[in-house]
Amino acid sequence: MYKAPLKELRFAIHQLIGDQPLVGLPGLPDYSTELTDAVLEEAARFAEGVLDPINRLGDRTGAKWTAEGVRMPAEFKAAYQKFVEGGWTQLRAAPEFGGQGAPILLGTAVEEMWASSNLAFKLCPMLTQGAVEAIDRCGNEQQKQTFLPKMISGEWSGTMNLTEPQAGSDLAAIRTRAVREGDHYRLYGQKIFITYGDHDYTPNIIHMVLGRVEGAPAGVRGISLFIVPKVLVNDDGSLGAPNDVRCVSIEHKLGIHASPTCVLSYGDKEGAIGYLVGEENRGLEYMFIMMNAARLSVGLEGYALAERAYQQALEYARTRNQGKPKTRNVPEGGKASPIAYHPDVKRMLLTMKAYTDAARSVALYAALQLDLGKQLPAGDEKAKAQARGDLLIPIVKGWSTELGVLMASLGVQVHGGMGFIEETGAAQTLRDSRIAPIYEGTTGIQANDLVGRKVGRDNGAAMYALIADMQAELEQLSSSDAGVAASKAAALEGVAALKDATAAILKDPDGALATCVPYLMLGGVAIGGWLTAKAHELAVRSISEDPEFFAAKQQIARFYASNLLPEAQTLARIVKSGAAAILDADPAKL
């Protein structure tokens, strides 16, 4: 049974990351520590009491395709209605259209609980949130007034429609046609892998669709973005006739069975009516607004499922008695001890906990930077925060989701043979986690974005600024405690490795394409090490406030420094000298 990690979230937000800069900002007039804690507690109750109990049911039952449309499990429909009634669809949306205007930082923390408790459910409001942001930032006033209030209220949902059967990740290859017709367009084509492309939660679904206007330039320069409702909307806001879009099938997937992944057909008859967002041929630029928001949301799914896997593994390891290890900290008496006391099982549990905590802190730090980039008045600090948030997005997405799969796999290993049995739930967590490194651009795509657009574009300025800040903060940590001193030293070594690897990436852009994934993973390990060392010192200073919690934080920080941070040196070595063996390889000889 999932338990929301409220203490971890509060510690990360209020103490480690430090949300104080958000208090009093003009765009966040109601933000406070007390409000944040109240929202987190309510979200925890919903995740534990409503979403977690139907998670395994959704895995077994799944979404069902019918000729009349996709049908969701009744329990999921009821949960969605409660989700809407609780105002959760409104949390991060703009107040002028009915939203609550919460910061990205708080939204990220809340989304973790949705993803841990029931990833398949969480994906529907996540996609709606991205569609809302795209229309809010790029749509015209009529489009905002027509669609945003009902999408933000949860009465309607939203999707993003990018790829097609022949295109994959190469959006330059999409073929969906858009034909001008008065104040709208008619769309013809097929889209695949559309999460929640059809369902019966809401009477309308607002699709954000990439297509080409007839005569547009080839490649990505000729892509436009359209709003295509499943059901047309009358001038008075009521629902009209069905649009010419239908779900022709749903995919049979490894995991997230209760999230319908749809093949959508546009224009089988007279053409699906769509409304141009912004200007023609700027669709990919607008869609990236949705994709960037989704990349943060998918990134947190990685460590959210790592958290779930850790909780499952820890509960099993504490209750499964087997053997009597001859080592430290083993209970006296009895013929067998819980397997949690076996050194290698402890290693696996410590790994799961340490990586999960580190990934959470990196994601929340990135969310804070995005908030500051959005809310601060124009100036150097605003620009620096935005650049840092943008830099961290591919690291959060790539590193966290790769960790999610690895930690879920470790969770199965802790269970032993029982982990391979569906009844324990460990297998579902592993299956569900596997999509996250693929969603919204694979890890390789994230790494290409990191080295090409985020590091290469400004010649490493944003990365070097982050490295300088990390070094300065680490140098200021007290070394009077031996544990903190060790964490500090290891974190400084990790940051130095990242600095050396960044120089190597900039020196050899062609080689960077071959070693960009190790570079991205190095970024996660090193930045996570910086924040874990800070957490270590905070735990030492705060031990009297909550001895059990902060002693556990020190234990985890010690493990991260001695057992996980050394990976930074290995990854840096690969970045600096591993490209040639990849570039020179002949695929014909593989």
Image (tube, helix red, strand yellow):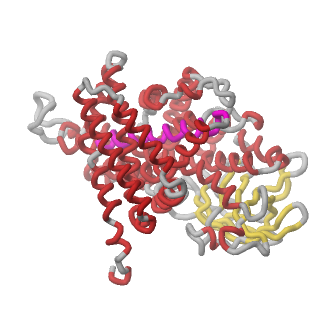
Considering every residue shown, the one lying at the far top of the view is 544
From where the camera sits, is residue 438 visible? no
The quadrant in which residue 50 appears is: top right
- Give the residue displayed 61% in from the left and 62% down from the top: 262
| Quadrant where the C terminus is found in the figure | bottom left
Predominant SS of the magenta segment = helix
Query: Is 230 on the left-hand or right-hand side of 578?
Result: right
Determine whether 328 is above or below 269 in the image.
Answer: above
Query: Is 177 on the left-hand or right-hand side of 524?
Result: right
Q: Which residues are magenta?
A: 351-377
Determine whether 511 is above or below 297 in the image.
Answer: below
The quadrant in which residue 564 appears is: top left
- In percent of width and height, residue 318 lies at 26, 35
What is the number of callouts on the image? 0
Q: Between residues 459 and 517, which one lies in front from this camera angle? A: 459
From where the camera sits, is residue 235 visible? yes
- In percent of width and height, residue 168 lies at 56, 69
- Give the residue displayed 51% in from the left and 41% down from the top: 366
- Give the residue displayed 63% in from the left and 73% down from the top: 173
Is 138 inside the magenta-drawn segment?
no
Is 353 inside the magenta-drawn segment?
yes
- Give the residue displayed 11% in from the left and 28% down from the top: 332
Q: Between residues 149 and 501, which one lies in front from this camera angle? A: 501
| Quadrant where the N terminus is found in the figure | top left
- In percent of width and height, residue 510 lies at 44, 68
Determine whether 346 is above or below 277 in the image.
Answer: above
Considering every residue shown, the one lying at the far bottom of the view is 588
